[in-house]
Image: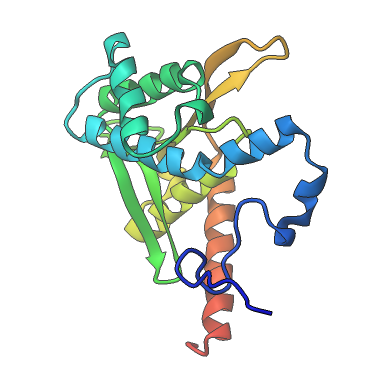
Amino acid sequence: MLWHDHSKDMPEGSHTFISPSKYYTLNYTRDQLFRAYCAQYASTVGDILHAYARDRIKFKNKVTRYDRKEIEFELLRKGIPANVFDMNVIFENFKNYVNDAIGYQLRPEQPLKYSEYCAGTADAILYEEVKNNKDYSGILRIHDYKSGLTPASMKQLEGYAALFFLEYGVKPGLTKTTLCIYQSVVDDDGTVFADIRTEEPEPELIAQRMDQYITLNRWYKSFRGDD
């Protein structure tokens, strides 16, 4: 047998989108294959929109209705096919996230680090001290932007809050914490609306998340022999 040479077009061990290694695609309908085709771009779309939002927030450049085409062009310019994203789903949610972050003077894409094994990056965050308040001495606000439609968990933002308190030594019991998730929602009738889910977690819940991270970090260090 004279085998064809694919060393240039198929690196060793590589697999294409349609491949026997993804045998489940054999039973896909055309619609299922299209959804899978779109899904492969989802994380890249999110990365592009997060980076674009970061710059708009950093330079306090609010998004208006006239920016819709510019945001669409940013996705196309970065290689995202026009048929894998829907600006009706993206735009209002993106605009709300950027403009609220600017309005609240949040800091975009801020890393939070408890240890070399336990860290993350908050989409947008603010902490400021409060004087002459009998209930709390500081306020913490964290906003998270989701470009996809899969419902997000508020536990992610609770985790960011926990990392903040662990890193900076601020007490959750003396802090008013507000967490917001910006995510588009599609109703059963197909109507798209930009939703903002807000939580003001109890200090006890954040303290629980902090304890969980402390425990996980200790376990992980022990696995590596760092203790």
Relative placement, left or right, of 66 versus 33 is left
Relative placement, left or right, of 111 versus 204 is left
The one nearer the camera, 169 or 8, is 8
Q: Give the residue furthest to the right.
A: 27
Residue, x 54% and y 33% (percent of image)? 148
The one nearer the camera, 217 or 51, is 51
Residue 153 appears in the rendering? no
How far from the left and from the top, in percent, is residue 40? 56, 44
How far from the left and from the top, in percent, is residue 68? 34, 16
When the figure is inspected, residue 39 is found, relative to residue 31, above or below; the finding is: below
The one nearer the camera, 45 or 128, is 45
Check the picture and name the quadrant holding the N terminus: bottom right
When the figure is inspected, residue 84 is found, relative to residue 166, above or below; the finding is: above
Q: How is the image coloured?
A: rainbow
Q: Give the residue furthest to the left.
A: 59
How far from the left and from the top, in percent, is residue 5? 53, 73
When the figure is inspected, residue 218 is found, relative to residue 72, above or below; the finding is: below
When the figure is inspected, residue 119 is found, relative to residue 28, above or below; the finding is: below
How far from the left and from the top, in percent, is residue 65? 32, 10
Residue, x 63% and y 18% (percent of image)? 186
Residue 101, by quadrant, is top left
Residue 185, by quadrant, is top right
Instruction: Please state the total of marks drawn on the protein image.
Output: 0
Residue, x 23% and y 36% (percent of image)? 55
Residue 19 appears in the rendering? yes
Relative placement, left or right, of 45 versus 73 is right
